[in-house]
Image: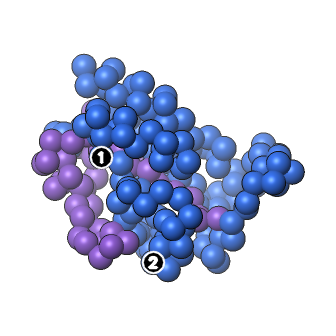
Amino acid sequence: MAQLCQYQNEFQQRNTRVIIISFGTLPAVQQWLSETCVSFTVLLDRERSIYNAYGLESSYWRSYNPKTLWFYFKAWVSGKKINDSHGDDTSQLGGDFIVNEEGILTLAYPSHDPTDRPLADALLAILPVLEK
Amino acid sequence: MSKVKIGNPAPDFTLQSAEGETVSLGNLVKSGNNVLLVFLRHLG
């Protein structure tokens, strides 16, 4: 998310609106916004109906596989803050999707596990390719 | 297995934003933008 915040002007210059979707509660989202970047629109999907519509799965095994645990261990050792889950389902996986101005899906990247997310600069780089 | 397919219309939705606005994907794309949807895991 920090990387997305860093590149928010570049997304704007490329005519791309970044929309964050969360199944967190409103107070949790507001707290999260205050700790990250506030300029993106955050939409609330408590029932996860849109997560389901986009095929995003829940998996404890994939959420807590050795690769993920190692990632969090390294983050903890380096002093990075590990936030509380606010009681939300920690098995829910995320994903990244790009929809063009005609409403057509041009990129679908459901993450395999929590460490599997495309970098913001990679998303920016692929935008001109998707427009062709 | 993803339910969505590249090249097909993206599933439309209407959701409330953290600021209390009603936002639909249809309206976002109508304004001539690409839309990057970032689905978060939990907020931890």
Q: Quadrant of residue B43?
A: bottom right
Q: Which chain is blue?
A: A
Expressed as whole percent of the image width and height from the top left, the position of residue A78 reads 82, 48
Give the residue drawn at x 21%, y 42%: B33
Is A69 placed left or right of A41 in the picture?
Answer: right
Q: In what element is the residue under mark 1?
A: strand
* Residue nearer the viewer, A126 or A95: A126
Q: Which chain's residue wears label 2?
A: A
Q: How is the image coloured?
A: by chain
Q: Which residue is mark 2?
A: A26
Expressed as whole percent of the image width and height from the top left, the position of residue A117 reads 57, 41
Disc 2 from disc 1: Cα separation: 21 Å
Give the residue drawn at x 33%, y 20%: A129
Expressed as whole percent of the image width and height from the top left, the position of residue B16 reads 30, 72
Is A61 placed left or right of A123 in the picture?
Answer: right
Is A73 placed left or right of A34 in the picture?
Answer: right
- The colour one sees for chain B in the rendered image is purple
Expressed as whole percent of the image width and height from the top left, the position of residue A52 reads 43, 60
Q: Which residue is mark 1?
A: A17
Dot 2 or dot 1, earlier in sequence: 1
